[in-house]
Image: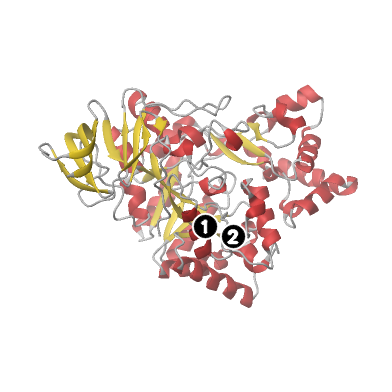
């Protein structure tokens, strides 16, 4: 007797091996048997004829922790075939906290991440263990593995203070990280382009990476730069791994800015050289030419380092505003400003909260300023004041050919760098990045079926066993007896992303069934309202 029998499916087991037709029996949340001749009574039978049956996808770089409190179903992710997400990336996590600097952590998450229900942070948890319990009590609709965000960790110990930590502060960060890892955190993440992570020195990071190494967990780094100082930033990430011995994951690897386009040989030269020296190094990628970030990237860091209220004060004061303008224009002339990577015609406003600004969502800054007859910097300053620093943008600065070349590298893992949203309710807002809805089906449709960049077996390996290996998920990522029955079933002829930059709030197509621990969550493309996810630690 089994709980679920999947018959006649074309199985791609996640290992990279060729597809084969067979049946899968599931019992008590695990795969019991795989074989062509399974004569067994079963409560539920799924005929998967003409469909691909593969492990549930593992999104190694996600931000769903920012929205899971608003809608625990994680709709836009589970409908992509994703069953497990690694969250708390880019230095932003909701734990660990401290009562001394709680306001600073909330400010960090609100401005840098537009974290959902930020005001509730600290009400139900302080420690990482308490946070994991809170998430489990939500009964999430997807599996989560939360990382400790370095920005949150630093804020919890020393607030938004710039400069190096004192000896006591450094020890405080090490101790708090150690405690969080012991309580179930999956590793450490950094967002080194964002305040307060950007205040750190590499020696500070190496010391924390040594703590990560002791627990055999992951260091995931949004490196210190992805355009002008890309290669220096990669060297820093490699150094962290080389001197600590920990596993390093370079988040959302890319060649940002036209001045970097075509430099994939140089990029892989850096990475492969490190691997040949024994550095435990991996990386992930999302399949789009635009990145998503905050508008605060276009103003000097000192303007935001003391929090959003101080930022408003600076931008509202005419002499200081003039000083900021001069500093930005000087940086543009030197070629070191964000504008040099993506000028105003390449920056799209994705999300604002003020009703009077909703009409600009989905428009490029150059177009908005032309319509309003306003100087771009004045527009940016005024918008940041009105939105209290929290303005999401899409930045178009990557080359399609580079994306394909990076994707084809044998060690590139597929990820979304997106948060779970939905086509209804509080999360159906803004002109969000289409990766929130479509990253994984986009690879399967556009890059596998249509453009033949990857084979189907290789693409699925990059979505399953490869991230599982990095995260030490021994019981997931492969279809085999005794593995957890996290399974995705899709139609290879119709699977595709539908979300676009102009109309992002659309679920992907062709993902027919998604199963978590033997329970069918998505059935014929519809959510069954079952919530079978948990926090994996």
Tell me, for residue 463, which label it has, or none.
Answer: none
Task: Classify mark 2: residues with Cα within 10 Å, few (<14), some (14-19) or many (20+).
Answer: few
Against 112, residue 168 (above or below) is below
Against 166, residue 110 (above or below) is above
Against 171, residue 106 (above or below) is above
Give percent across and percent down for residue 440.
Answer: 41, 35
Give percent across and percent down for residue 278.
Answer: 35, 61
Q: Nearer the viewer, residue 136 or 210?
A: 136
Q: Nearer the viewer, residue 331 or 125?
A: 125
Give percent across and percent down for residue 489.
Answer: 31, 34
At x 48% / y 55%, what residue is drawn? 137
- 343 horizontally vs 371: left or right: left
Rendered image quadrant of residue 410: top left
Against 238, residue 331 (above or below) is above
- Pointer 2 with pointer 1, Cβ within 8 A: yes
- Location of the N terminus by quadrant is top left
Task: Classify mark 1: residues with Cα within 10 Å, few (<14), some (14-19) or many (20+).
Answer: some
- Location of the C terminus by quadrant is bottom left
At x 58% / y 34%, what residue is drawn? 425
- 443 horizontally vs 328: left or right: left
Which residue was labeled with disc 1? 134
Number of residue marks: 2
Label 1, secondary structure: give it. Answer: helix
Which residue was labeled with disc 2? 124
- 367 horizontally vs 32: left or right: right
At x 63% / y 68%, what residue is drawn? 157
Give percent across and percent down for residue 2.
Answer: 20, 44
Rendered image quadrant of residue 106: bottom right
- Residue 63, visible in the rendered structure: no
Label 2 or label 1, whichever comes before in sequence order? 2
- Residue 504, visible in the rendered structure: yes
């Amino acid at each position: 007797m089994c709980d679920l029998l999947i018959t006649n499916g074309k199985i791609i087991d996640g290992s990279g091996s060729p597809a084969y037709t067979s049946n899968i029996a599931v019992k008590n949340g695990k795969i019991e048997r795989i074989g062509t001749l399974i004569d067994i009574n079963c409560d539920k039978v799924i005929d998967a004829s003409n469909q691909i049956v593969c492990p549930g996808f593992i999104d190694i770089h996600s931000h769903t922790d920012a929205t899971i409190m608003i809608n625990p179903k994680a709709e836009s992710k589970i409908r992509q075939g994703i069953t497990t997400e690694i969250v708390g990336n880019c230095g932003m996590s909701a734990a660990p906290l401290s009562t001394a600097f709680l306001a600073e952590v909330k400010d960090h998450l609100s401005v840098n991440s537009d974290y959902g229900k930020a005001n509730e942070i600290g009400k139900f948890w302080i420690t990482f263990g308490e946070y994991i319990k809170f998430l489990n009590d939500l009964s999430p609709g997807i599996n989560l593995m939360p990382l400790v965000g370095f920005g949150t960790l630093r804020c919890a110990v020393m607030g938004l203070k710039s400069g190096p930590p004192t000896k006591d502060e450094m020890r405080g960060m090490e101790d708090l990280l150690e405690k969080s890892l012991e309580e179930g955190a999956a590793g450490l993440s950094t967002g080194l382009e964002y305040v307060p992570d950007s205040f750190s020195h590499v020696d500070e990071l190496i010391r924390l990476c040594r703590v990560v190494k002791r627990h055999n967990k992951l260091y995931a780094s949004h490196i210190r730069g992805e355009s002008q100082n890309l290669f220096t930033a990669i060297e820093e990430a490699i150094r962290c791994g080389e001197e600590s011995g920990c596993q390093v994951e370079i988040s959302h690897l890319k060649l940002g800015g036209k001045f970097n386009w075509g430099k994939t040989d140089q990029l892989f030269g850096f990475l492969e050289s490190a691997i040949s020296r024994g550095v435990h190094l991996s990386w992930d990628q999302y399949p789009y030419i635009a990145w998503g970030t905050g508008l605060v990237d276009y103003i000097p860091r000192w303007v935001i380092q003391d929090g959003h209220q101080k930022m408003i004060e600076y931008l509202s004061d005419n002499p200081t505003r003039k000083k900021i303008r001069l500093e930005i224009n000087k940086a543009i002339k030197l070629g070191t400003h964000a504008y040099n990577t993506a000028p105003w015609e390449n920056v799209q406003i994705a999300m604002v909260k003020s009703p009077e600004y909703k009409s600009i969502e989905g428009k490029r800054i150059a177009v908005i300023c032309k319509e309003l007859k306003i100087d771009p910097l004045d527009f940016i300053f005024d918008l940041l004041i009105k939105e209290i620093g929290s303005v999401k943008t899409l930045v178009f600065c990557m080359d399609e050919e580079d994306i394909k070349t990076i994707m084809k590298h044998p060690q590139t893992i597929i990820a979304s760098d997106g948060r779970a949203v939905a086509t209804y309710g509080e999360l159906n807002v803004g002109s969000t990045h289409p990766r929130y809805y479509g990253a994984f089906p986009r690879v399967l449709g556009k890059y596998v079926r249509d453009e033949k960049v990857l084979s189907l077996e290789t693409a699925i390996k990059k979505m399953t066993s490869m991230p599982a290996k990095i995260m030490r998920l021994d019981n997931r990522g492969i279809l085999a007896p005794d593995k957890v029955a996290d399974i995705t079933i899709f139609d290879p002829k119709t699977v595709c992303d539908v979300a676009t930059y102009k109309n992002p709030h659309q679920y992907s197509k062709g993902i027919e069934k998604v199963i978590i621990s033997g329970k069918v969550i998505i059935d014929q493309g519809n959510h069954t309202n079952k919530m079978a996810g948990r926090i994996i630690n």
